Image (cartoon, rainbow, N blue to C red):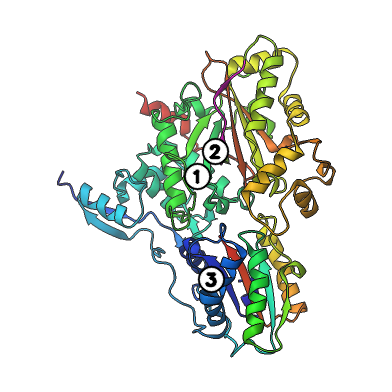
C-alpha cells in the first residue's frame, strides 16, 4: 500500500490461508482493489526446488497479472460497515435474533442478550459521554468505537449497566497504537487480558482471589465477554479470517483484579502514577502461560529461584524478534509469596531487577530453538537479531555464553492476586504488545447509584 | 419464548473511503522491479527465484532486491517505517513493487 500511495503499482504475495485477511485489511484501510498473488497452500515446509516449481507454474502469472492487469477503481468495501448505529438491523424472537447474529459472525458462539435500544440507553446512563463520542478507532476493521456500540456489545455479553465505565476505559486502552491490537491476529495466538485496580474492584465485586481468571463471577466474566465481542465486532477479529491464532485460546478475554489489601507493595496503578483512590484498567496480551507453579518458604530465596526457573521455561524465541517495548512478561504472585519476598526487603522494582539479572539462557540453546522455528537462507540466531537491533548488541556472544532474555524492568508487569491461601505464581508472556493503563472515569453520582442498586 | 426484539448492530462506522489503486503497467520489459520483504516465510528463497523467472520472460528488467530497501524484519512499528519505504521506492526509481510473503 505504501507503493500505491506514491504512484507505483504493487502486488502482494500472500499464502492462501491469509488471502481473506489481506483483502479484509486492505479494504478496511481503503484499498479494496489492492492486488494480491495467492500462493497455494503453505510455503514454510517446501524445498527450494518446490518453491521454484510452484512459482513458475502458478504464482508468477498471478504476480504479473497483479502488476499489469485490472481495474484501478476502488472495489466494494468489506461488508458490515454500519452507517447509522441506531438503525434496527434485525427483528425477531430470542432464537431468531441469535441465529441472525451467529450467521453474521457477531457472536462468540454462545447465546447473546438481544441488544435493544432500551437496554443500550440504560447502559449509557452510567457514563458521562455523548453516545457517538469517538473512544478510539480499532484495527483491523478500522471502525470507530463509541459509547453506543460499546454498549450494544455490553448488552449482548450480559453486562450490568454499571460495568460501562470499565468498558470505556478498557477500549481506550486497546485503541492506543502502542497496545498494538492488530498484533492479536498472529498465528501464535494472542489473547487480551485486563487487570483492574482501585476502589471499583470491590464496588463491582470483581474477583481478585481464587479462580480470578476462571468463569463464575458476573463482573469478571461479562466484562471479559463484552471486550471479546467489541474486539470481534468493532475491531474485526474473526477466527480464520483476521484472527489467525493457529490453535487459539479458550474463552473470552481474561478480566482480573489485583488483591490490593493483601499486597505488601503499592498497587500496580500507583506505580503507573495514579492515586490509590483512582480506579484503572490495564490492558495487556498473553501468548503463553507458565504452570501455576508453587514456590516455598518463609524467606525469598526459593520463591526467587522458582520464578527464575519458570521465567526461563516460558521463553520463546519470538521474544527476540521484537524490540522493546513490544514484548513483556507478566508475573502474578499470590499474597503469601509476595509477603515472603517483601519480608526480605524486595520492592517490586528490586524483584524485577533480580529477575532480569538472573534469567539467563545459553546462546546455544536459544539458537537451537531458532533453528527449528523458521527456515531462512541467513539463519536466525542471536547474532542475526542483535544485528537487526531488536536485542542489545552486547548479547551477541559465543555459543557457550549465557545471556539475559529480558532487557529491562519496564518489560515486566507484576500483580499480586490469586488465592490468599496458596503459594503459587503464574507468568504470561507476549510479544507485539505494550500494556496500557487508563483511568476509569465515573459519573458524578456513582456511589449513590451503586448504593441504590444494593438496597 | 415469543417476545419480539428489535435489535441494533454491534458494528462500528468504518473510517475513511475506498480509494482507487494506481493504474497497472503494460508489461515488465525495461522496468525496475523493487522487492519488499517482511523477513519471513521463505521470502529469501522466493525473491531470487522470482528474479530468475521474470528475467526469463521479460528483457532488460532491473531489480532492487529486498536487502536494498527498508524491510519489516522487526515486525512492529510498521507504520513508522512506511515513510522511509516510500522515499526509497521513489529514490530507487521503482516502476513496480512485489511485496511478500504474507504467511
Q: Which residue is mark 1?
A: A168
Q: Are marks 2 and 3 in contact (CB under 8 Å)?
A: no
Q: Chain of mark 2?
A: A
Where residue A299 appears, as percent x and y from the top left, is 70, 11
Q: CA distance from mark 1 to mark 2?
A: 8 Å
Q: Against A185, is A292 above or below?
A: above
Callout 1 crowding tier (Cα within 10 Å): few <14, some 14–19, many ≥20: many
For this view, does A122 lie left or right of residue A93?
right
Label 1 SS:
helix
Decide which of A228, A291 is in the foreground and name it.
A291
Callout 3 crowding tier (Cα within 10 Å): few <14, some 14–19, many ≥20: some
Decide which of B23, A90 is in the foreground and name it.
B23
**Residue found at x 49% / y 84%:** A71
Q: Which residue is mark 2?
A: A440
* Residues indicated by labels 1 and 3 sit on the same polypeptide chain: yes
What range of the chain is rendered magenta? A287-295
Q: Against A282, is A209 above or below?
A: above
The quarter in which the N terminus of chain A is drawn is bottom right
Q: Viewer-nearest of labels 2 and 3?
A: 3
Q: Earlier in the sequence, mark 1 or mark 3?
A: 3
Where residue A174 appears, as percent x and y from the top left, is 56, 47
Q: Are marks 1 and 2 in contact (CB under 8 Å)?
A: yes
Q: CA distance from mark 1 to mark 3?
A: 49 Å
**Residue found at x 54% / y 38%:** A440
Where residue A239 appears, as percent x and y from the top left, is 43, 52
Q: Against B88, is A235 above or below?
A: above
Q: Chain of mark 3?
A: A
Q: Chain of mark 1?
A: A
Q: CA distance from mark 2 to mark 3?
A: 54 Å
Res B72 quadrant in image: bottom right
Amino acid at each position: 500500500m505504501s507503493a500505491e500511495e506514491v504512484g507505483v503499482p504493487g502486488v502482494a504475495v500472500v499464502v492462501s490461508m491469509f488471502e481473506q485477511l489481506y483483502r479484509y485489511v486492505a479494504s478496511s484501510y481503503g484499498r479494496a482493489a489492492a492486488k494480491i498473488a495467492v500462493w497455494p497452500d503453505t510455503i514454510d515446509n517446501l524445498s527450494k526446488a518446490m518453491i521454484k516449481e510452484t512459482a513458475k507454474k502458478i504464482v508468477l502469472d498471478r504476480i504479473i497479472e497483479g502488476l499489469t492487469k485490472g481495474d484501478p477503481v476502488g472495489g466494494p468495501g468489506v461488508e458490515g460497515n454500519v452507517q447509522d448505529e441506531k438503525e434496527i438491523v434485525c427483528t425477531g424472537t430470542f432464537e431468531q435474533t441469535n441465529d441472525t447474529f451467529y450467521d453474521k459472525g457477531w457472536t462468540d458462539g454462545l447465546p447473546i442478550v438481544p441488544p435493544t435500544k432500551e437496554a443500550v440507553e440504560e447502559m449509557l446512563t452510567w457514563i458521562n459521554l455523548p453516545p457517538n463520542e469517538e473512544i478510539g478507532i480499532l484495527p483491523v476493521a478500522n471502525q470507530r468505537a463509541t459509547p453506543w456500540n460499546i454498549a450494544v456489545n455490553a448488552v449482548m455479553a450480559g453486562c450490568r449497566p454499571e460495568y460501562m465505565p470499565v468498558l470505556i476505559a478498557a477500549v481506550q486502552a486497546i485503541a492506543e497504537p502502542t497496545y498494538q491490537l492488530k498484533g492479536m491476529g498472529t498465528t501464535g495466538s494472542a489473547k487480551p487480558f485486563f487487570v483492574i485496580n482501585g476502589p471499583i474492584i470491590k464496588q463491582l465485586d470483581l474477583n481478585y482471589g481464587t479462580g480470578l481468571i476462571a468463569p463464575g463471577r458476573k463482573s469478571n466474566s461479562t466484562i471479559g465477554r463484552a471486550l471479546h465481542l467489541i474486539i470481534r465486532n468493532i475491531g474485526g477479529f474473526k477466527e480464520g479470517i483476521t484472527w489467525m491464532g493457529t490453535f487459539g485460546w479458550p474463552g473470552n478475554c481474561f478480566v482480573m483484579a489485583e488483591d490490593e489489601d493483601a499486597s505488601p507493595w503499592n498497587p500496580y496503578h500507583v506505580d503507573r502514577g495514579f492515586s490509590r483512590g483512582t480506579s484503572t484498567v490495564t490492558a495487556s496480551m498473553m501468548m503463553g502461560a507458565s504452570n501455576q507453579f508453587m514456590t516455598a518458604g518463609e524467606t525469598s530465596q526459593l520463591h526467587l529461584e522458582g520464578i527464575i526457573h519458570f521465567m526461563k521455561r516460558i521463553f520463546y524465541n519470538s521474544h527476540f524478534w521484537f524490540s522493546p517495548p513490544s514484548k513483556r512478561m507478566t508475573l502474578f504472585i499470590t499474597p503469601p509469596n509476595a509477603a515472603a519476598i517483601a519480608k526480605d526487603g524486595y520492592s517490586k522494582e528490586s524483584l524485577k531487577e533480580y529477575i532480569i539479572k538472573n534469567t539467563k539462557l545459553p546462546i546455544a540453546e536459544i539458537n537451537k530453538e531458532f533453528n527449528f522455528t523458521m527456515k531462512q537462507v541467513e539463519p536466525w540466531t542471536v547474532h542475526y537479531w542483535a544485528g537487526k537491533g531488536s536485542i542489545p548488541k552486547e548479547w551477541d556472544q559465543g555459543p557457550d555464553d549465557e545471556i539475559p532474555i529480558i532487557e529491562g524492568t519496564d518489560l515486566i508487569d507484576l500483580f499480586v492476586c490469586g488465592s490468599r491461601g496458596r503459594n503459587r505464581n503464574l507468568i504470561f508472556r507476549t510479544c507485539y504488545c505494550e500494556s496500557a493503563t487508563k483511568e476509569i472515569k465515573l459519573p458524578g453520582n456513582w456511589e449513590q447509584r451503586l448504593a441504590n442498586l444494593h438496597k | 419464548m415469543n417476545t419480539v426484539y428489535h435489535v441494533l448492530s454491534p458494528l462500528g462506522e468504518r473510517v475513511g473511503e475506498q480509494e482507487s489503486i494506481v493504474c497497472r503497467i503494460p508489461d515488465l520489459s525495461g522496468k525496475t522491479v523493487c522487492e519488499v520483504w517482511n523477513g519471513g516465510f521463505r521470502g529469501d528463497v522466493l525473491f531470487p527465484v522470482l528474479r530468475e523467472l521474470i528475467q526469463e520472460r521479460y528483457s532488460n528488467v532491473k531489480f532492487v532486491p529486498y536487502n536494498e530497501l527498508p524491510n519489516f524484519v522487526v515486525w512492529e512499528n510498521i507504520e513508522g517505517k512506511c515513510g522511509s519505504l516510500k522515499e526509497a521506492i521513489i529514490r530507487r526509481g521503482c516502476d513496480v513493487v512485489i511485496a511478500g510473503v504474507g504467511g
